[in-house]
Image (spheres, grey):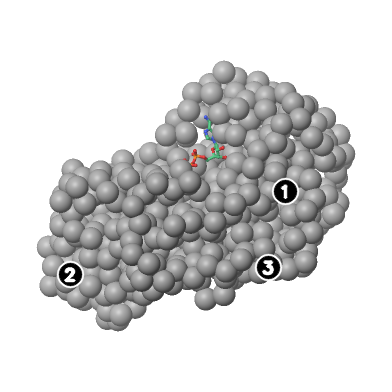
Amino acid sequence: MRSLKTPSPSEIMATLVLEAPLTKIGAAARKFLSKPKQLLIDGKWINACSGKTFHVFDPATGDTIASVAEGEATDIDLAVKAARKAFSGPWSKLTPSERGKIIWKIGDLILANLDELAELESLDNGKPLAIARVADVPLAADLFHYMAGWATKLEGHTIPISVPYAPGAKFFAYTKRDPLGVVGQIIPWNFPLLMAAWKIGPALTTGNTIVLKPAEQTPLTALRLGEIALEAGLPPGVLNIVTGYGETAGGALAAHDDVDKIAFTGSTEVGKIIVRAAAGNLKKVTLELGGKSPAIVFKDVHDKQAAIQGAANAIFFNHGQCCAAGSRLYVEKAIFDEVVAGVAERANAIKLGAGVDSGTEMGPLVSEEQFHRVSDFIAEGLKAGATALAGGKPVGEKGYFVQPTVFTNTRPDMKIVREEIFGPVVVAEPFEDLEQVMKFANGTDFGLASSIWTSDLSKAHRAAEIMRAGTVWINCHNIFDAAMPFGGYKQSGWGREMGHEALELYTETKAVCIAL
Ligand code: ADP
């Protein structure tokens, strides 16, 4: 399947540990895998209208792990009809408190099935099981718990109005927040369950109904979440899940005339396609797109080892398959060599293996396509004259493993410096001072996230002020919380996920004015 030149067997054995994945997962996950994977429409699990299915692969081996219904435009249409019916049906009749309790229960049930969900996520996406257990699944549960509380707190305002052209007249004006209606949600493969939670949580708490299209590479946990939502008491049709490919199922959802909003997370390239598709009925659009996030280390940083570890985690967490990955490392000149050597040393020490294997610190990339994409970037970087202080090669004969890679001697015009790689590849450059590094940091079309490593409080705040990015982490990176809004400046997106900011993007403001 793979055709790239691989390193020697001893190089492979030094870093790669592969065990048989299916024997590594528990009975609940195995039982889920053995069931048919159908579409969830109007509270029922059904086959795609065409009867077609597609394969889902274990990225550690390239072997098929499941066969999933392949939804297309006709299935999307059925799902939208079900969501429309549910919007004015039972869902709208529930009190906010009743709605909140169901959403809370989804969070509880995610935690009750933590091991199964973590195993499915690890097997499907390739991420280390330990990470799925402590990050992906608990964060998804927390998102539902956080959002559940908002159902009873979606308040409007009373507004004292003056109306200059109606002297003496009296009015009472107030606002309320109405749900948008049917929302389409298209999610990526890097945090499959968590991205589903980020999308579904705020849409439900504000009273919308949903058609969700998971990524074709990783549909398993979204389907399991569909079962959990029904078990929690979500009425039929409130959450519909249509698995399928981007251009067909995703494209039909983004273009559908009876969808009131499309929320998308994925590449900037596809984000632009979504905007065009949404123009037909001018549906609302929110986008969480790509990034090329800077991690900036100043020489005054008190704990240099923590900064080195932090910069390494910023890029290597989730194999660099994070939209917020710290993929551009800027280090103040005086400590550049030491910090970059430290990051390279950590890169070399990372143990690669299947996500479900114990001891794995970094799994394979999610798919063969992604493996080739990242490998091509690395090859291009080397060809353009960059130096690989660590990594620079694919690993093993099977599966989609790439060595964690640290590039130095880069130039701003190189593709590896300008474009999002979405893999474990960082470019490191030295800088002279705050003014220069902020120019480097902001010199990109993206603006999703950033981190600043310094012990100088006022410098940290000055840099945060200048940074054109939706998140600025100081002395940390990749810190996410259901209460903290996340989203991008510039071509990194429109709108915010999480926090109460997300709720505004799932509601319309209605102004009501009464003549007294
Ligand atoms: P990646 O390139 O990292 O796989 P994408 O942006 O292509 O990320 O995919 C993110 C999500 O968008 C997936 O669910 C995918 O199926 C979907 N998608 C891809 N292309 C389209 C499209 N043309 N229209 C709608 N959705 C799409």
Q: Secondary structure at mark 3?
A: helix
Residue at x 79% of width, y 59% of height: 31
Residue at x 49% of width, y 63% of height: 363
Mark found first going from the N terminus, 2 or 1: 1
- Above or below: residue 359 compared with residue 417: below
Label ID, residue 223: 1
* Residue type for callout 1: Leu
Task: Tell me if 190 is positioned left or right of 104 in this view.
Answer: left
Q: Quadrant of residue 428?
A: bottom left
Q: Nearer the viewer, residue 63 or 503?
A: 63
User: Residue most toward the front?
Assistant: 9
Mark found first going from the N terminus, 1 or 3: 3
In the rendered image, which quarter contains the C terminus? top right
* Residue type for callout 3: Thr
* Residue type for callout 2: Phe
How far from the left and from the top, in percent, is residue 142?
65, 63
Q: Nearer the viewer, residue 320 or 80?
A: 320
Name the residue tied to disc 3: 23
Name the residue tied to disc 2: 336
Disc 1 residue: CB within 8 Å of ligand 1: no
Mark 1 surroundings within 10 Å by alpha-carbon count, few (fewer than 14), some (14 through 19), many (20 or more): many
